[in-house]
Amino acid sequence: QVHLEESGGSLVQTVGSLRLSCAASRSIFIGYVMGWYRLAPGNQREWVARISLGHVTVYAGSVKGRFIFSRDNVKSTVSLQMNNLRPNDTAIYYCNGCRNLWACTPEGSWGQGTQVTVSF
């Protein structure tokens, strides 16, 4: 059974920082690209960042240079260090796995996510 559990979301002021974590069951983590996604009110879910098994990362333009994605292949966890946060980063953040770093279709069931709220 696939299990994804996100944590670390909070209320933070503009230009503040947060670190999100995601624990994944081994069945989705091993051999998979892992990604962070976010869902803001009124918007569709969008991808934020991806990381390959070999720690190659890609970022959406809106977060590049501010967010850092890392993974621990032993603990089956991924983390997203978010710096210089902006109000439009406010969203529920989710993690998921996929097969291809450049053509990524999430394969696991979505967890509950973790709420990030950035105030002015």
Image (cartoon, helix red, strand yellow):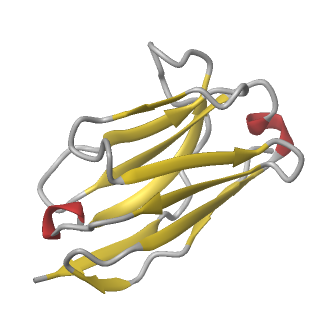
Percent from the top left, x then y, of residue 99? 62, 18
Q: Does 44 appear above or below 114?
A: above
Percent from the top left, x then y, of residue 6? 58, 64
Seen at 15% across and 70% down, the residue is 87
Left or right of 35 in this view: 23: right
Q: Does 115 appear above or below 38?
A: below
Left or right of 36 in this view: 2: right
Q: Does 108 appear above or below 18?
A: above
Image quarter of the N terminus: top right
Seen at 15% across and 62% down, the residue is 88
Seen at 80% across and 48% down, the residue is 76
Image quarter of the C terminus: bottom left
53 vs 28, nearest the viewer? 53
Q: Based on the displayed image, in which of its 4 quarters is residue 32 positioned?
A: top right
Q: Based on the displayed image, in which of its 4 quarters is residue 13 positioned?
A: bottom left
104 vs 88, nearest the viewer? 88
Please count the marks in the image: 0
Seen at 86% across and 53% down, the residue is 75
**Residue lying farthest to the front in this orientation:** 65
Percent from the top left, x then y, of residue 20? 53, 66
Percent from the top left, x then y, of residue 30? 81, 32
